[in-house]
Image (tube, grey):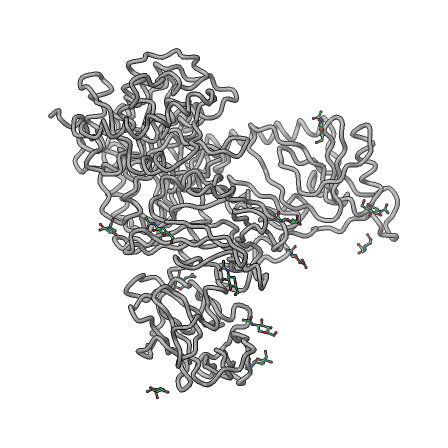
């Protein structure tokens, strides 16, 4: 499952952008008996990495907490990594004080009352001091004997952030579970509902809802990676290690390259996230997060809420329900859930006869948690059983089994129309029905109904014709581009009702212009540019025209409303043909090859042929659209520039992108066109296999396709056809297939200078230039060398994998000398 559109992440990133207060450093890293922290005073670690003092989360609150953040020379956005008094803020930081008292580090509030303490019982001498380390660990120790193990350390009491060097696990002696607990909301550091904890029974992490029920598992540790996190094998950023003995079990990690500032966060939305600071753009870069989609977070929308991956915000209340707290809902805290708009009549003795509760069907849903099976042999019986018990909130009948829900409904999801979700019947007061059908209480009979429909049609037609006149008046400006009014696009898209998809830049809707041409309208999000600059960027994009690029037809710019209008592509995006079998036919090899070639041509044009080189930055199957003849068109190019410096923030919203991102994105070095080449290579593997590159099979084992390809093509007798999508039953041109696999491996080299240019890729695919055997990329190599039991992608037998295993390392060392051959052409 991939998320293509995630405005929610965006808001998360923004949250950390509040500016620094003017803190006054005490010029020390230590709080000792004769010093304290109060007001704007702070302490800073010796190497100026972390700072500790009072902070205020967000703008609106007037509450202050003792927290730790990166020193501003390291990370220019104040980023809180630890909070002491999560639940007991102070309002006047100048009369509050953090100091050593009775052998403990203690926070006193305005009334000099202790509101937070390290809570050590042993009353040590007054030589106790608290030292802030460069690793972000606040250590309480005996100042007269600093070398012995700490009396207390903040690493044992993390908030939502896991810093390198810290441990998250279990102390078997004290039974204390060190866990990451999310903030309650983006502006409230109090412990929220979600926590990351070590499973006490296995070497794996779990994310819990309300400390009681887990909804995500990392899969067990196999010595190299967590089995449920296949993408880890591409990750040579972190060095994870697992320690388990009689006293404790935990994981810890370090960052291979010490210059990288990186952290894990248990986010308030229920996802665990991995972020690195990019100095070049002054932004946190979200590199990884799990669970992949927001709706997989258990109970995210609260009681009687329903999650929808495609709506914004993700949560809505069920029909007949309203948010319990509008304020929470507005600040994206949905866990409070919804309440009935109208009380049920069931159990209310004063209700007049004839009016009892009724059931409202809700289609295509993932059913709520905790159903109870009820004996019933028909849908009617199922309904009446539920109706007869006032605490029965909903039922569902699947043809043989009646399920009912008592109390509240939690963890529901609205599924896409084309998936086979279930229908649930939700109990509502009867009055909820009459009010929605007719506002004057008139029962609409067949005749009246059709009259209404006919007159509605007439109205629509009328409005449509009126609009048509307006659209005709739209002037052609900025070269060939059409300037549209917002109302025109609103009408063309039936008020943005038919969503085609989303992306880092905004959602896309289908529309029809009065001249009957079909369009795709992209509602841009997060554009901060001025009018003039926007128009000039848009007109630049308008001049970029190529048969393999989606054509921009026009735009709309009315204040904050910025939209782009594109040609509509009837065959949708490549991912829908590759990965979802449903109703689309399997793409044959010729078509796939042409898509690979066409995409490469489109990218070549972007990189080399147009006036300013355009780096796409987000190549993936979702961004390759197909016209009626399955000719590929690259979408979404040039938009990075439109959003200007906020670019990396936009990238963080593209969560589907992870698997396609070149390693240089994380190291913070300048991004060149070769980053697109990498993503293109990753996509080629998927074009060949018809599946996502990394998948977890039912038995929990992890498969990573590029590793398998790299090993097969480096063998003398590698089974190239086994790489092909098995649905094609071997129907492919073997030479084209080999070429494609080789070029894909070249494209994903870690060192960008070893990757071919897109122009070279075109020549290779056209057969003009030969391609030599590629070396196995380092990131794959590390994995192949060390893994005892490689699990391969194909359904094929185990003989194949053992054969591969023994060949891998020799094969790749043989080919190392060939590295530069692809670039030997002009
Ligand atoms: C805080 O306030 C500033 C200026 O008033 C505003 O630009 C910024 O978006 C606000 N930040 C949050 C997180 O609300
Ligand atoms: C605090 O006390 C320590 C030793 O007890 C001393 O070295 C230091 O100078 C004192 N600091 C201040 C600010 O008085
Ligand atoms: C200080 O904390 C105590 C105990 O929590 C509380 O009763 C008191 O109101 C607080 N003082 C102020 C000024 O908030
Ligand atoms: C310290 O102990 C008090 C009372 O037992 C408790 O309320 C508080 O949460 C503890 N503080 C910490 C930091 O563990
Ligand atoms: C761990 O094992 C215990 C005892 O078998 C069980 O009660 C508990 O639910 C298990 N924990 C998890 C997270 O599976
Ligand atoms: C979480 O669990 C506690 C009891 O452990 C319960 O009181 C609370 O209502 C639960 N929270 C939610 C949101 O269900
Ligand atoms: C990874 O961490 C372990 C344990 O901290 C250490 O022994 C090992 O040398 C590290 N590996 C690398 C390559 O840094
Ligand atoms: C466990 O703790 C005991 C007592 O603290 C200590 O003697 C022993 O060495 C520890 N074992 C390990 C494996 O660290
Ligand atoms: C570490 O990363 C920096 C850029 O952040 C890079 O310049 C440097 O070469 C890297 N060091 C190693 C050993 O990879
Ligand atoms: C019971 O019904 C009466 C009349 O419809 C209504 O006024 C009253 O609020 C209801 N009581 C409850 C507890 O819902
Ligand atoms: C309604 O169903 C619940 C759950 O099955 C049960 O506990 C309760 O006793 C039932 N109430 C009535 C009135 O039957
Ligand atoms: C209905 O659900 C039950 C339990 O989930 C399942 O065993 C049964 O096969 C389902 N029946 C149909 C017709 O889907």
Q: Evaluate whether residue 379 shows in this view.
A: yes
The image quadrant in which ligand 4 is located: bottom right
Residue occupying the point 68% across, 46% down: 409
Total labels: the figure holds 0
Work out whether 34 lies above or below 649: below
Task: Tell me where residue 401 sits by quadrant.
Answer: top right
Quarter holding residue 114: bottom right
Q: Which residue is found at the position 28% from the left and 34% from the top?
A: 777
Report x, y in % for residue 631.
Answer: 33, 20
Query: Is the residue 144 above or below the residue 598 in the image?
Result: below
List x then y, in percent, for residue 495.
49, 38
Relative placement, left or right, of 806 versus 62 is: left
What x and y, as percent, mark residue 337? 63, 52
Q: Is residue 170 left or right of residue 559?
A: right
- Viewer-proximal residue among 421 and 763: 763
Residue at image position (48%, 78%) is: 105
> Is 798 positioned to the left or the right of 781 in the image?
right
Vertical position of residue 204 compared to residue 361: above or below: below
As rendered, which of 504 and 34 lies closer to the eye? 34
x and y, in percent, of residue 543 in the image: 22, 33
Could one spot residue 625 in this view of the protein? Answer: no
- In-front residue for pair 654/626: 654
Q: Quadrant of the C terminus?
A: top left
Between 746 and 815, the one nearer to me in the picture:
815
- Image vertical order of residue 681 relative to residue 158, above or below: above
């Amino acid at each position: 499952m991939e998320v293509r559109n995630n405005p929610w992440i965006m808001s998360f990133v923004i949250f950390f952008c509040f500016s620094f207060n003017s803190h006054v450093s005490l010029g020390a890293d230590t709080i000792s008996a004769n010093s304290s922290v109060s007001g704007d005073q702070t302490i800073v670690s010796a190497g100026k990495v972390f700072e500790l003092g009072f902070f205020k989360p967000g703008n609106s609150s007037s509450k202050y907490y003792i927290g730790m953040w990166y020193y501003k020379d390291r990370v220019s956005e104040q980023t809180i990594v630890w909070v002491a008094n999560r639940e007991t803020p102070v309002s006047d930081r100048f009369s509050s004080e953090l100091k050593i008292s009775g052998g403990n580090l203690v926070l006193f509030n305005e009334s000099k009352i202790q509101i937070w303490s390290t809570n050590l019982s042993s009353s040590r001498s007054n030589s106790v001091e608290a030292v802030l380390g460069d690793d972000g660990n606040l250590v309480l120790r005996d100042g007269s004997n600093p070398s012995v193990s700490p009396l207390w350390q903040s690493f044992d009491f993390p908030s939502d952030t896991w810093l390198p060097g810290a441990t998250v696990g279990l102390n078997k002696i004290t039974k204390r579970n060190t866990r990451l607990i999310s903030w309650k909301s983006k502006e409230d550091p109090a412990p929220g509902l979600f926590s990351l904890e070590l499973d006490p029974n296995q070497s794996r992490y779990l994310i819990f809802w309300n400390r009681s029920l887990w909804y995500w598992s990392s899969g067990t540790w196999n010595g190299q990676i967590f089995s449920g996190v296949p993408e880890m094998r591409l990750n040579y950023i972190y060095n994870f290690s697992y320690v388990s003995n009689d006293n404790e079990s935990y994981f810890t990690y370090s960052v291979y390259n010490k210059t990288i500032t990186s952290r894990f966060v248990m986010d308030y939305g229920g996802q665990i996230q991995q972020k690195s600071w990019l100095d070049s753009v002054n932004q946190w870069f979200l590199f990884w997060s799990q669970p992949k989609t927001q709706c997989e977070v258990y109970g995210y929308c609260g009681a009687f809420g329903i999650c929808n991956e495609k709506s914004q915000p993700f949560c809505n209340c069920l029909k007949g329900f309203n948010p319990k707290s509008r304020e929470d809902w507005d600040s994206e805290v949905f866990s409070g859930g919804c309440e009935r708009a109208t009380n049920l009549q069931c159990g209310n003795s004063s209700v007049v006869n004839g009016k009892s509760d009724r059931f409202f069907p809700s289609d295509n849903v993932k059913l709520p948690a905790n159903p109870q099976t009820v004996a019933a042999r028909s849908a009617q019986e199922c309904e009446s059983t539920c109706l007869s018990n006032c605490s029965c909130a909903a039922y569902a009948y699947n043809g043989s089994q009646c399920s009912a829900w008592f109390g509240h409904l939690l963890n529901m999801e609205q599924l896409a129309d084309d998936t086979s979700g279930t229908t649930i019947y939700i109990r509502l007061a009867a009055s909820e029905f009459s009010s929605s059908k007719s506002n004057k209480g008139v029962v609409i009979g067949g005749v009246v109904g059709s009259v209404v429909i006919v007159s509605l049609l007439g109205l629509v037609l009328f409005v449509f014709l009126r609009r048509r006149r307006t659209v005709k008046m739209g002037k052609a400006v900025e070269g060939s581009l059409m300037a549209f009014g917002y109302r025109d696009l609103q009408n063309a898209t039936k008020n943005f009702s038919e969503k085609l998809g989303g992306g880092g830049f905004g959602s896309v809707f289908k529309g029809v212009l009065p001249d009957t041409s079909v369009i795709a309208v992209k509602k841009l999000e997060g554009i901060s540019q001025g009018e003039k600059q926007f128009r000039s960027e848009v007109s630049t994009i308008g001049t970029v025209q190529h048969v393999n690029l989606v054509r921009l037809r026009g735009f709309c710019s009315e204040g904050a409303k910025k939209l782009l209008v594109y040609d509509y592509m009837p065959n949708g995006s490549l991912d829908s043909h590759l990965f979802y079998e449903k109703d689309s036919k399997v793409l044959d090899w010729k078509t796939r090859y042409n898509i690979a070639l066409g995409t490469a041509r489109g990218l070549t044009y972007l990189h080399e042929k147009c006036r300013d080189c355009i780096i796409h930055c987000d190549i993936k199957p979702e961004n390759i659209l197909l016209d009626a003849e399955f000719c590929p068109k690259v979408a979404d190019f040039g938009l990075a520039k439109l959003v200007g410096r906020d670019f990396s923030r936009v990238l963080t919203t593209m969560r589907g992108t992870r698997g396609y991102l070149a390693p240089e994105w994380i190291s913070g070095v300048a991004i060149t066109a070769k980053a697109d080449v990498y993503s293109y290579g990753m996509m080629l593997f998927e074009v060949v296999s018809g599946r996502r590159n990394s998948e977890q099979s039912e038995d929990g084992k992890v498969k990573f396709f590029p590793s398998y390809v790299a090993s097969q093509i480096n063998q003398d007798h590698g089974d190239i056809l086994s790489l092909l999508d098995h649905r094609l039953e071997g129907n492919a041109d073997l030479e084209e297939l080999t070429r494609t696999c080789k070029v894909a491996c070249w494209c994903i080299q870690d060192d960008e200078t070893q990757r071919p240019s897109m122009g070279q890729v075109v020549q290779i695919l056209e057969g003009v230039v030969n391609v030599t055997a590629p070396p196995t990329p380092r990131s794959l190599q590390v994995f192949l060398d060390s893994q005892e039991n490689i699990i391969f992608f194909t359904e094929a037998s185990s003989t194949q994998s053992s054969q591969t295993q023994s060949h891998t390392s020799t094969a790749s060392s043989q080919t190392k000398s060939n590295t530069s051959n692809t670039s030997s052409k002009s």
